[in-house]
Image: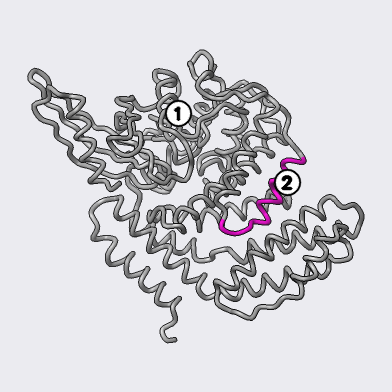
Protein backbone atom coordinates (compact mmCIF):
# COMPACT_ATOMS: atom_id res chain seq x y z
CA UNK A 1 0.00 0.00 0.00
CA UNK A 2 1.44 3.40 -0.93
CA UNK A 3 1.75 6.21 1.58
CA UNK A 4 -1.02 8.12 -0.23
CA UNK A 5 -3.34 5.11 0.01
CA UNK A 6 -2.60 4.68 3.70
CA UNK A 7 -3.35 8.35 4.39
CA UNK A 8 -6.59 8.21 2.39
CA UNK A 9 -7.74 5.08 4.21
CA UNK A 10 -6.72 6.51 7.56
CA UNK A 11 -8.84 9.56 6.90
CA UNK A 12 -11.79 7.29 6.10
CA UNK A 13 -11.14 5.45 9.38
CA UNK A 14 -11.06 8.73 11.31
CA UNK A 15 -14.27 9.90 9.68
CA UNK A 16 -15.92 6.65 10.73
CA UNK A 17 -14.63 6.99 14.29
CA UNK A 18 -15.59 10.66 14.55
CA UNK A 19 -19.04 11.00 12.97
CA UNK A 20 -19.51 14.36 14.69
CA UNK A 21 -16.32 15.88 13.23
CA UNK A 22 -16.77 19.07 11.23
CA UNK A 23 -13.39 18.64 9.56
CA UNK A 24 -10.48 16.19 9.63
CA UNK A 25 -7.13 17.35 8.30
CA UNK A 26 -3.96 15.29 7.89
CA UNK A 27 -0.82 17.33 7.24
CA UNK A 28 2.95 17.02 7.05
CA UNK A 29 2.93 13.34 6.15
CA UNK A 30 6.41 11.83 6.56
CA UNK A 31 7.08 8.15 5.89
CA UNK A 32 9.78 6.99 8.28
CA UNK A 33 12.63 5.16 6.65
CA UNK A 34 14.28 2.05 7.94
CA UNK A 35 11.55 -0.19 9.27
CA UNK A 36 11.46 -3.50 7.47
CA UNK A 37 8.64 -5.05 9.47
CA UNK A 38 6.13 -2.18 9.65
CA UNK A 39 5.12 0.65 7.37
CA UNK A 40 5.63 3.65 9.63
CA UNK A 41 4.33 7.12 8.82
CA UNK A 42 4.47 10.29 10.91
CA UNK A 43 1.84 12.98 10.37
CA UNK A 44 -0.04 15.82 11.98
CA UNK A 45 -3.71 15.40 12.68
CA UNK A 46 -6.38 17.99 13.32
CA UNK A 47 -9.95 17.02 14.10
CA UNK A 48 -12.42 19.87 14.55
CA UNK A 49 -15.69 19.20 16.30
CA UNK A 50 -18.46 21.56 17.33
CA UNK A 51 -16.93 22.46 20.67
CA UNK A 52 -13.43 20.98 20.50
CA UNK A 53 -10.36 20.86 18.32
CA UNK A 54 -7.86 18.01 18.59
CA UNK A 55 -4.36 18.61 17.21
CA UNK A 56 -1.78 15.84 17.55
CA UNK A 57 1.49 14.75 16.05
CA UNK A 58 1.12 11.03 15.53
CA UNK A 59 2.86 7.97 14.14
CA UNK A 60 0.90 5.26 12.34
CA UNK A 61 2.35 1.74 12.17
CA UNK A 62 0.83 -0.72 9.77
CA UNK A 63 1.75 -4.35 9.15
CA UNK A 64 3.40 -4.63 5.76
CA UNK A 65 1.65 -6.68 3.10
CA UNK A 66 4.90 -8.67 2.98
CA UNK A 67 7.02 -8.24 6.10
CA UNK A 68 10.31 -9.87 7.00
CA UNK A 69 9.10 -11.14 10.34
CA UNK A 70 5.77 -12.72 11.12
CA UNK A 71 4.54 -10.66 14.04
CA UNK A 72 1.17 -9.25 14.91
CA UNK A 73 0.34 -5.68 15.75
CA UNK A 74 -1.40 -6.59 18.97
CA UNK A 75 1.86 -7.86 20.45
CA UNK A 76 3.40 -4.45 19.95
CA UNK A 77 0.29 -2.71 21.25
CA UNK A 78 0.29 -4.90 24.38
CA UNK A 79 3.92 -4.00 25.06
CA UNK A 80 3.34 -0.26 24.82
CA UNK A 81 0.27 -0.54 27.01
CA UNK A 82 2.04 -2.67 29.63
CA UNK A 83 5.03 -0.35 29.92
CA UNK A 84 3.08 2.94 29.88
CA UNK A 85 3.83 4.99 33.00
CA UNK A 86 6.75 2.79 34.07
CA UNK A 87 10.49 3.42 34.12
CA UNK A 88 10.63 2.04 30.59
CA UNK A 89 9.67 4.99 28.38
CA UNK A 90 7.26 4.21 25.55
CA UNK A 91 5.10 6.40 23.29
CA UNK A 92 1.52 7.13 24.27
CA UNK A 93 -0.98 4.88 22.49
CA UNK A 94 -3.98 6.30 20.66
CA UNK A 95 -5.76 3.69 18.51
CA UNK A 96 -5.45 0.04 17.60
CA UNK A 97 -7.40 -1.22 14.60
CA UNK A 98 -7.25 -4.90 13.75
CA UNK A 99 -10.04 -4.92 11.17
CA UNK A 100 -8.31 -5.34 7.81
CA UNK A 101 -11.07 -3.55 5.93
CA UNK A 102 -9.35 -0.18 6.37
CA UNK A 103 -5.83 -0.84 5.18
CA UNK A 104 -5.65 -4.50 4.30
CA UNK A 105 -3.76 -5.24 7.50
CA UNK A 106 -3.94 -4.19 11.16
CA UNK A 107 -2.45 -0.89 12.28
CA UNK A 108 -2.08 1.22 15.37
CA UNK A 109 -1.48 4.87 16.10
CA UNK A 110 0.66 6.45 18.79
CA UNK A 111 1.80 9.89 19.80
CA UNK A 112 4.92 11.09 17.99
CA UNK A 113 7.93 11.53 20.27
CA UNK A 114 9.38 14.79 18.99
CA UNK A 115 12.86 16.35 18.95
CA UNK A 116 14.55 12.97 19.22
CA UNK A 117 16.96 10.84 17.26
CA UNK A 118 17.24 7.07 16.83
CA UNK A 119 20.27 6.62 14.61
CA UNK A 120 23.51 5.64 16.31
CA UNK A 121 25.32 7.48 13.52
CA UNK A 122 24.22 10.60 15.39
CA UNK A 123 26.99 9.90 17.88
CA UNK A 124 29.42 11.04 15.18
CA UNK A 125 27.71 14.42 15.05
CA UNK A 126 28.94 17.21 17.36
CA UNK A 127 25.60 17.79 19.09
CA UNK A 128 25.34 14.15 20.20
CA UNK A 129 29.00 13.18 20.74
CA UNK A 130 29.03 14.26 24.36
CA UNK A 131 26.01 12.22 25.40
CA UNK A 132 26.65 8.82 23.91
CA UNK A 133 27.94 7.21 27.12
CA UNK A 134 25.04 8.70 29.05
CA UNK A 135 22.62 7.26 26.50
CA UNK A 136 24.40 3.90 26.61
CA UNK A 137 24.23 3.65 30.40
CA UNK A 138 20.58 4.62 30.40
CA UNK A 139 19.82 2.09 27.67
CA UNK A 140 21.41 -0.73 29.68
CA UNK A 141 19.45 0.26 32.78
CA UNK A 142 16.21 0.29 30.79
CA UNK A 143 17.06 -3.09 29.28
CA UNK A 144 17.66 -4.43 32.80
CA UNK A 145 14.36 -2.92 33.96
CA UNK A 146 12.48 -4.72 31.18
CA UNK A 147 14.12 -8.00 32.23
CA UNK A 148 13.20 -7.37 35.87
CA UNK A 149 9.54 -6.57 35.12
CA UNK A 150 6.95 -9.07 36.34
CA UNK A 151 5.04 -10.29 33.25
CA UNK A 152 2.14 -11.50 35.38
CA UNK A 153 1.68 -8.16 37.13
CA UNK A 154 1.78 -6.43 33.75
CA UNK A 155 -0.93 -8.69 32.31
CA UNK A 156 1.47 -9.99 29.68
CA UNK A 157 2.02 -13.54 30.92
CA UNK A 158 -1.33 -14.84 29.66
CA UNK A 159 -0.91 -13.12 26.30
CA UNK A 160 2.31 -14.87 25.32
CA UNK A 161 3.41 -18.49 25.44
CA UNK A 162 5.51 -19.16 28.50
CA UNK A 163 8.30 -21.68 27.87
CA UNK A 164 9.87 -23.85 30.57
CA UNK A 165 13.08 -22.38 31.96
CA UNK A 166 15.19 -25.05 30.24
CA UNK A 167 13.31 -24.73 26.93
CA UNK A 168 13.74 -21.04 26.06
CA UNK A 169 16.84 -21.61 23.97
CA UNK A 170 15.31 -24.48 22.00
CA UNK A 171 12.11 -22.64 21.22
CA UNK A 172 14.00 -19.66 19.82
CA UNK A 173 16.53 -21.73 17.90
CA UNK A 174 13.77 -23.95 16.43
CA UNK A 175 11.79 -20.90 15.35
CA UNK A 176 14.64 -19.18 13.53
CA UNK A 177 16.00 -22.36 11.98
CA UNK A 178 12.56 -23.07 10.61
CA UNK A 179 12.41 -19.52 9.25
CA UNK A 180 15.73 -20.09 7.47
CA UNK A 181 14.45 -23.42 6.07
CA UNK A 182 11.48 -21.60 4.56
CA UNK A 183 13.27 -18.60 3.11
CA UNK A 184 16.84 -19.50 2.21
CA UNK A 185 17.64 -19.17 -1.48
CA UNK A 186 20.96 -20.96 -1.23
CA UNK A 187 22.63 -23.25 1.32
CA UNK A 188 24.50 -21.62 4.23
CA UNK A 189 27.26 -23.93 5.56
CA UNK A 190 28.46 -21.53 8.28
CA UNK A 191 24.98 -20.91 9.59
CA UNK A 192 24.12 -24.62 9.64
CA UNK A 193 27.36 -25.43 11.47
CA UNK A 194 26.56 -22.78 14.08
CA UNK A 195 23.04 -24.15 14.60
CA UNK A 196 24.40 -27.67 15.08
CA UNK A 197 26.98 -26.44 17.59
CA UNK A 198 24.40 -24.56 19.65
CA UNK A 199 22.15 -27.61 19.75
CA UNK A 200 25.02 -29.79 20.95
CA UNK A 201 26.02 -27.30 23.63
CA UNK A 202 22.83 -25.78 25.09
CA UNK A 203 23.02 -22.94 27.62
CA UNK A 204 21.98 -23.35 31.26
CA UNK A 205 18.26 -22.89 32.00
CA UNK A 206 16.98 -19.32 32.22
CA UNK A 207 17.29 -17.75 35.67
CA UNK A 208 13.63 -16.77 35.35
CA UNK A 209 11.14 -16.45 32.50
CA UNK A 210 10.92 -12.77 31.66
CA UNK A 211 9.63 -10.35 29.06
CA UNK A 212 12.01 -10.27 26.11
CA UNK A 213 11.71 -7.22 23.86
CA UNK A 214 13.11 -9.23 20.94
CA UNK A 215 14.79 -6.35 19.11
CA UNK A 216 16.40 -4.43 21.98
CA UNK A 217 19.31 -2.57 20.44
CA UNK A 218 20.80 0.73 19.41
CA UNK A 219 18.57 2.18 16.72
CA UNK A 220 15.33 1.09 18.36
CA UNK A 221 14.99 3.86 20.92
CA UNK A 222 14.66 7.63 20.73
CA UNK A 223 17.00 9.98 22.54
CA UNK A 224 17.43 13.72 22.62
CA UNK A 225 20.41 16.07 22.68
CA UNK A 226 20.39 16.01 26.49
CA UNK A 227 21.11 12.30 26.29
CA UNK A 228 17.69 11.31 27.61
CA UNK A 229 16.00 8.21 26.22
CA UNK A 230 12.38 9.22 25.62
CA UNK A 231 10.97 6.04 24.09
CA UNK A 232 11.84 2.39 23.47
CA UNK A 233 10.31 1.31 20.15
CA UNK A 234 9.74 -1.69 17.89
CA UNK A 235 8.31 -4.24 20.32
CA UNK A 236 6.78 -6.45 17.62
CA UNK A 237 9.06 -9.41 18.44
CA UNK A 238 8.27 -9.33 22.18
CA UNK A 239 7.95 -12.76 23.79
CA UNK A 240 8.64 -14.60 27.04
CA UNK A 241 12.05 -16.10 27.45
CA UNK A 242 15.57 -15.98 28.86
CA UNK A 243 16.69 -12.57 30.19
CA UNK A 244 20.08 -13.02 28.50
CA UNK A 245 18.46 -12.97 25.06
CA UNK A 246 17.88 -9.20 24.97
CA UNK A 247 21.29 -8.45 26.46
CA UNK A 248 23.01 -10.62 23.86
CA UNK A 249 21.00 -9.09 20.99
CA UNK A 250 21.96 -5.58 22.11
CA UNK A 251 25.62 -6.70 22.12
CA UNK A 252 25.53 -8.05 18.57
CA UNK A 253 28.50 -6.40 16.88
CA UNK A 254 26.44 -5.65 13.80
CA UNK A 255 25.01 -2.65 15.68
CA UNK A 256 28.49 -1.37 16.40
CA UNK A 257 30.48 -2.53 13.41
CA UNK A 258 32.71 0.54 13.43
CA UNK A 259 33.59 0.12 17.12
CA UNK A 260 33.26 -3.58 17.97
CA UNK A 261 34.31 -3.27 21.62
CA UNK A 262 31.34 -1.08 22.41
CA UNK A 263 27.68 -1.90 22.87
CA UNK A 264 25.78 -0.13 20.10
CA UNK A 265 28.56 2.43 19.57
CA UNK A 266 27.85 3.72 23.09
CA UNK A 267 29.69 2.12 26.01
CA UNK A 268 32.25 -0.68 26.54
CA UNK A 269 30.68 -4.12 26.56
CA UNK A 270 31.86 -5.09 30.06
CA UNK A 271 30.43 -1.89 31.58
CA UNK A 272 27.17 -2.51 29.73
CA UNK A 273 26.91 -5.99 31.23
CA UNK A 274 27.60 -4.68 34.76
CA UNK A 275 24.89 -2.02 34.47
CA UNK A 276 22.42 -4.56 33.11
CA UNK A 277 23.21 -6.97 35.97
CA UNK A 278 22.64 -4.25 38.56
CA UNK A 279 19.37 -3.14 36.99
CA UNK A 280 17.95 -6.59 36.31
CA UNK A 281 19.21 -8.49 39.34
CA UNK A 282 20.34 -11.32 37.03
CA UNK A 283 23.86 -12.63 36.44
CA UNK A 284 25.31 -12.71 32.97
CA UNK A 285 27.37 -15.88 33.06
CA UNK A 286 30.00 -15.43 30.29
CA UNK A 287 29.48 -18.88 28.73
CA UNK A 288 25.71 -18.58 28.76
CA UNK A 289 25.89 -15.06 27.38
CA UNK A 290 28.21 -16.24 24.62
CA UNK A 291 25.71 -18.96 23.65
CA UNK A 292 23.06 -16.28 23.29
CA UNK A 293 25.42 -14.02 21.37
CA UNK A 294 26.02 -16.78 18.82
CA UNK A 295 22.26 -17.27 18.73
CA UNK A 296 21.78 -13.59 17.90
CA UNK A 297 24.08 -13.99 14.91
CA UNK A 298 21.88 -16.86 13.73
CA UNK A 299 18.71 -14.86 14.34
CA UNK A 300 20.26 -11.87 12.56
CA UNK A 301 21.22 -13.96 9.56
CA UNK A 302 17.71 -15.43 9.47
CA UNK A 303 16.33 -11.90 9.28
CA UNK A 304 18.78 -10.82 6.56
CA UNK A 305 17.99 -13.97 4.60
CA UNK A 306 14.33 -13.10 4.94
CA UNK A 307 15.01 -9.61 3.60
CA UNK A 308 16.92 -11.08 0.68
CA UNK A 309 14.04 -13.46 -0.01
CA UNK A 310 11.46 -10.67 0.02
CA UNK A 311 13.49 -8.55 -2.35
CA UNK A 312 14.51 -11.38 -4.66
CA UNK A 313 10.98 -12.71 -5.04
CA UNK A 314 9.65 -9.25 -5.85
CA UNK A 315 7.45 -9.11 -2.74
CA UNK A 316 9.00 -5.73 -1.97
CA UNK A 317 11.07 -3.19 -3.84
CA UNK A 318 12.20 -1.29 -0.72
CA UNK A 319 15.94 -0.62 -0.91
CA UNK A 320 16.31 -1.38 2.80
CA UNK A 321 15.55 -5.04 2.12
CA UNK A 322 18.11 -5.23 -0.68
CA UNK A 323 20.68 -3.42 1.46
CA UNK A 324 20.04 -5.63 4.50
CA UNK A 325 20.19 -8.80 2.44
CA UNK A 326 23.62 -7.79 1.14
CA UNK A 327 25.36 -5.64 3.73
CA UNK A 328 23.96 -7.02 6.96
CA UNK A 329 24.34 -10.59 5.72
CA UNK A 330 28.00 -9.99 4.87
CA UNK A 331 28.87 -8.34 8.18
CA UNK A 332 26.84 -10.76 10.29
CA UNK A 333 28.54 -13.71 8.58
CA UNK A 334 31.95 -12.29 9.49
CA UNK A 335 30.79 -11.85 13.10
CA UNK A 336 29.48 -15.42 13.30
CA UNK A 337 32.67 -16.79 11.78
CA UNK A 338 34.70 -15.02 14.47
CA UNK A 339 32.45 -16.46 17.13
CA UNK A 340 32.75 -19.98 15.75
CA UNK A 341 36.51 -19.83 15.23
CA UNK A 342 37.32 -18.37 18.61
CA UNK A 343 38.29 -14.81 17.72
CA UNK A 344 35.27 -13.21 19.37
CA UNK B 1 32.42 -4.59 -23.69
CA UNK B 2 33.60 -1.02 -23.08
CA UNK B 3 32.73 0.52 -20.77
CA UNK B 4 32.48 -2.52 -18.53
CA UNK B 5 29.22 -3.16 -16.66
CA UNK B 6 30.87 -2.73 -13.26
CA UNK B 7 32.09 0.71 -14.31
CA UNK B 8 28.62 1.65 -15.53
CA UNK B 9 27.03 0.53 -12.27
CA UNK B 10 29.54 2.51 -10.19
CA UNK B 11 29.10 5.61 -12.31
CA UNK B 12 25.31 5.53 -12.29
CA UNK B 13 25.34 4.98 -8.54
CA UNK B 14 27.69 7.93 -8.06
CA UNK B 15 25.57 10.20 -10.28
CA UNK B 16 22.42 9.26 -8.37
CA UNK B 17 24.13 9.95 -5.05
CA UNK B 18 25.86 13.19 -5.93
CA UNK B 19 23.53 14.84 -8.44
CA UNK B 20 20.00 13.62 -7.82
CA UNK B 21 19.91 12.71 -4.15
CA UNK B 22 20.46 16.29 -2.90
CA UNK B 23 17.52 17.45 -5.02
CA UNK B 24 15.03 15.26 -3.15
CA UNK B 25 12.95 16.91 -0.47
CA UNK B 26 11.93 14.19 1.95
CA UNK B 27 14.22 12.23 4.20
CA UNK B 28 12.51 9.01 3.12
CA UNK B 29 13.14 9.63 -0.57
CA UNK B 30 16.77 10.62 0.07
CA UNK B 31 17.36 7.50 2.14
CA UNK B 32 15.70 5.25 -0.43
CA UNK B 33 17.70 6.69 -3.34
CA UNK B 34 20.88 6.83 -1.30
CA UNK B 35 20.66 3.16 -0.43
CA UNK B 36 19.87 2.29 -4.03
CA UNK B 37 22.96 4.21 -5.18
CA UNK B 38 25.03 2.48 -2.51
CA UNK B 39 23.81 -0.93 -3.59
CA UNK B 40 24.67 -0.15 -7.23
CA UNK B 41 28.23 0.64 -6.21
CA UNK B 42 28.47 -2.53 -4.21
CA UNK B 43 27.05 -4.90 -6.80
CA UNK B 44 29.55 -3.52 -9.29
CA UNK B 45 32.11 -5.37 -7.14
CA UNK B 46 30.01 -8.53 -7.33
CA UNK B 47 29.66 -8.22 -11.10
CA UNK B 48 33.39 -8.55 -11.62
CA UNK B 49 33.88 -11.50 -9.30
CA UNK B 50 30.57 -13.37 -9.74
CA UNK B 51 31.80 -16.13 -12.05
CA UNK B 52 35.26 -16.32 -10.50
CA UNK B 53 34.17 -16.90 -6.94
CA UNK B 54 31.69 -19.60 -7.94
CA UNK B 55 34.18 -21.47 -10.12
CA UNK B 56 36.85 -21.20 -7.43
CA UNK B 57 34.49 -22.29 -4.68
CA UNK B 58 33.15 -25.24 -6.66
CA UNK B 59 36.72 -26.38 -7.32
CA UNK B 60 37.70 -26.10 -3.65
CA UNK B 61 34.62 -27.97 -2.46
CA UNK B 62 35.25 -30.78 -4.95
CA UNK B 63 38.84 -31.06 -3.68
CA UNK B 64 37.49 -31.58 -0.18
CA UNK B 65 35.02 -34.17 -1.42
CA UNK B 66 37.88 -36.12 -2.98
CA UNK B 67 39.96 -35.82 0.16
CA UNK B 68 37.01 -36.86 2.35
CA UNK B 69 36.20 -40.09 0.54
CA UNK B 70 38.23 -42.41 2.76
CA UNK B 71 37.05 -40.92 6.04
CA UNK B 72 33.34 -40.97 5.26
CA UNK B 73 31.57 -43.97 6.78
CA UNK B 74 28.16 -43.54 5.19
CA UNK B 75 28.25 -45.43 1.84
CA UNK B 76 25.47 -43.36 0.27
CA UNK B 77 27.18 -40.08 1.19
CA UNK B 78 30.53 -41.42 -0.02
CA UNK B 79 29.00 -42.33 -3.38
CA UNK B 80 27.44 -38.88 -3.80
CA UNK B 81 30.73 -37.21 -2.89
CA UNK B 82 32.52 -39.29 -5.50
CA UNK B 83 29.99 -38.36 -8.17
CA UNK B 84 30.04 -34.65 -7.31
CA UNK B 85 33.83 -34.47 -7.16
CA UNK B 86 34.01 -35.73 -10.74
CA UNK B 87 31.67 -33.12 -12.21
CA UNK B 88 32.95 -30.12 -14.13
CA UNK B 89 31.43 -26.84 -15.20
CA UNK B 90 30.38 -26.69 -18.82
CA UNK B 91 27.97 -23.79 -18.66
CA UNK B 92 29.64 -20.62 -17.38
CA UNK B 93 26.58 -18.43 -17.08
CA UNK B 94 26.47 -17.16 -13.52
CA UNK B 95 23.02 -18.70 -13.05
CA UNK B 96 24.33 -22.14 -14.08
CA UNK B 97 27.43 -21.81 -11.92
CA UNK B 98 25.18 -20.77 -9.07
CA UNK B 99 22.97 -23.84 -9.42
CA UNK B 100 26.03 -26.06 -9.35
CA UNK B 101 27.40 -24.15 -6.36
CA UNK B 102 24.14 -24.65 -4.45
CA UNK B 103 24.16 -28.39 -5.15
CA UNK B 104 27.75 -28.64 -3.96
CA UNK B 105 27.06 -26.54 -0.88
CA UNK B 106 24.14 -28.79 0.08
CA UNK B 107 26.42 -31.79 -0.04
CA UNK B 108 29.17 -29.86 1.73
CA UNK B 109 26.82 -29.23 4.66
CA UNK B 110 25.94 -32.92 4.83
CA UNK B 111 29.62 -33.84 4.78
CA UNK B 112 30.40 -31.35 7.55
CA UNK B 113 27.61 -32.69 9.77
CA UNK B 114 28.79 -36.24 9.15
CA UNK B 115 32.45 -35.49 9.89
CA UNK B 116 31.55 -33.72 13.14
CA UNK B 117 30.29 -36.96 14.65
CA UNK B 118 33.23 -39.07 13.49
CA UNK B 119 36.06 -39.76 15.88
CA UNK B 120 39.80 -39.83 15.22
CA UNK B 121 42.58 -37.66 13.96
CA UNK B 122 41.66 -38.02 10.29
CA UNK B 123 38.17 -36.74 10.97
CA UNK B 124 39.50 -33.75 12.94
CA UNK B 125 41.91 -32.86 10.16
CA UNK B 126 39.11 -33.07 7.63
CA UNK B 127 36.89 -30.96 9.86
CA UNK B 128 39.60 -28.31 10.04
CA UNK B 129 39.90 -28.35 6.24
CA UNK B 130 36.14 -27.83 6.00
CA UNK B 131 36.34 -24.89 8.40
CA UNK B 132 39.15 -23.32 6.37
CA UNK B 133 36.92 -23.53 3.32
CA UNK B 134 34.01 -21.96 5.26
CA UNK B 135 36.35 -19.11 6.20
CA UNK B 136 37.19 -18.67 2.53
CA UNK B 137 33.52 -18.73 1.60
CA UNK B 138 32.81 -15.83 3.93
CA UNK B 139 35.82 -13.98 2.55
CA UNK B 140 34.74 -14.56 -1.06
CA UNK B 141 31.43 -12.87 -0.27
CA UNK B 142 32.85 -9.85 1.54
CA UNK B 143 32.08 -6.50 0.00
CA UNK B 144 35.13 -4.30 0.22
CA UNK B 145 33.40 -1.22 -1.11
CA UNK B 146 30.90 -0.86 1.76
CA UNK B 147 33.05 1.35 3.90
CA UNK B 148 33.94 3.85 1.19
CA UNK B 149 30.45 3.92 -0.26
CA UNK B 150 28.82 4.33 3.17
CA UNK B 151 31.09 7.22 4.08
CA UNK B 152 30.33 8.93 0.79
CA UNK B 153 26.63 8.52 1.38
CA UNK B 154 26.81 9.76 4.97
CA UNK B 155 28.61 12.91 3.82
CA UNK B 156 25.89 13.61 1.26
CA UNK B 157 22.85 12.71 3.33
CA UNK B 158 23.32 13.17 7.07
CA UNK B 159 20.74 11.43 9.20
CA UNK B 160 17.74 13.35 10.35
CA UNK B 161 15.56 12.68 13.38
CA UNK B 162 13.55 9.48 13.02
CA UNK B 163 10.29 10.47 14.66
Q: Looking at the picture, does residue B31 appear above or below residue A242?
A: below
Give the quarter of the figure containing the N terminus of chain B: bottom left
Q: Which residue is mark 1?
A: A75
Task: Please tell me which residue lies in front, B159 or A27.
Answer: A27
Q: Position of residue B140 (x, y in %)?
A: 62, 67
Instruction: Measure the C-alpha gap from mark 1 to mark 2.
Output: 30 Å
Return the chain for callout 1: A
Q: Are marks 1 and 2 on the same chain?
A: yes
Which residue, as the protein is rendered here, is positioned at the far top? A153
- Rendered view: A316 above or below A244: below
Marks 1 and 2, the one that precedes in the sequence: 1
The residue segment tinted magenta is A185-200
Q: Is residue A134 magenta?
A: no
A191 magenta-colored:
yes
Magenta part, dominant SS: helix
On the picture, is A209 further left or further right than B38? right
Question: Number of callouts in the render?
Answer: 2
Q: Which mark is residue A196?
A: 2
Chain ID at mark 2: A
How many residues crowd mark 2 within 10 Å: few (<14), some (14–19), many (20+)?
Answer: few
Left or right: A110, with A310 as reference point: left
For the point 21% across and 25% down, the residue is A17
Q: Quadrant of residue A106?
A: top left
Q: Residue at x 29, y 35 (%)?
A: A101
Would you say A215 lies left or right of B19 here?
right
Q: Position of residue A195 (x, y in %)?
A: 69, 46
In x, y percent, where is residue A2? 28, 48
Residue A320 is left or right of residue A244, and the answer is left
Q: Quadrant of the C terminus of chain B?
A: top left
Amino acid sequence: MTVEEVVRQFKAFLTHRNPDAISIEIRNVRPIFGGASRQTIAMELEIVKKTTKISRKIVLRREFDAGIIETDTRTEWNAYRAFADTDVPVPELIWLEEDKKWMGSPFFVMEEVVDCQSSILAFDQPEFMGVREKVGEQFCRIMGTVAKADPKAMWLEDKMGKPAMDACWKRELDYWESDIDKKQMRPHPLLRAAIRRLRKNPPPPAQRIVIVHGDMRAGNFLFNQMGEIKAVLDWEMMHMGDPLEDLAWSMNRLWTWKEPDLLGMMIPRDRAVRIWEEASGFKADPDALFWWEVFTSIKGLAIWISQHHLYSTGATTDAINCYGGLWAYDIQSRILLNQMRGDA
Amino acid sequence: MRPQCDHILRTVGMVLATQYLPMLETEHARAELGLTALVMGVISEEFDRAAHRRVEENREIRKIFKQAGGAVQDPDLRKRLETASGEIEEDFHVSALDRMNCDLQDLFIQLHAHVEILEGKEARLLEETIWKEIENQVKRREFLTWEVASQLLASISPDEPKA
